[in-house]
Image (tube, rainbow, N blue to C red):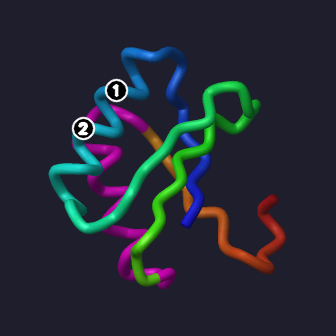
Amino acid sequence: MQFKTNARCQGCSAAILKAMNEKFPNASWSMDLENTDKILEGHGLPENAETAAQVEKTLAETGFKGSWIERGGNNL
């Protein structure tokens, strides 16, 4: 699953990855700060709207915004 985020720096990335690893310990996470959309990517998660909502909520609780990039969707 991929999410556009408003992360800006390595400190933002570290905070987001820590929160994601705590909330979803069986998934693997990475951040691409070089991408203009500051992509958060999670592997090992069910790719559905319910999981996306949980990830977006976790981002919000960490102080960041994020939106799910659905595969095959028009929001790329």
Residue farthest toward the left in the current orientation of the protein: 22
Q: Residue at x 34, y 36 (%)?
A: 16
> Circle 1 sits in a helix, a strand or a loop, which is it?
helix
Tell me the magenta residue range: 47-64
Residue 39 sits inside the magenta stretch: no
Q: Which residue is mark 2?
A: 18
Q: Is residue 62 magenta?
A: yes
Indicate the quadrant where residue 60 lies: top left
Q: Which residue is mark 1?
A: 14
Q: Position of residue 33 (x, y in %)?
A: 62, 27
Q: Element under label 2?
A: helix
- Residue type at tag 1: Ala
Marks 2 and 1 close (CB-CB < 8 Å) = yes
Q: Residue 24 appears in which quarter of the rendering? A: bottom left
Q: Nearer the viewer, residue 48 or 22?
A: 22
Q: Residue at x 50, y 48 (%)?
A: 66
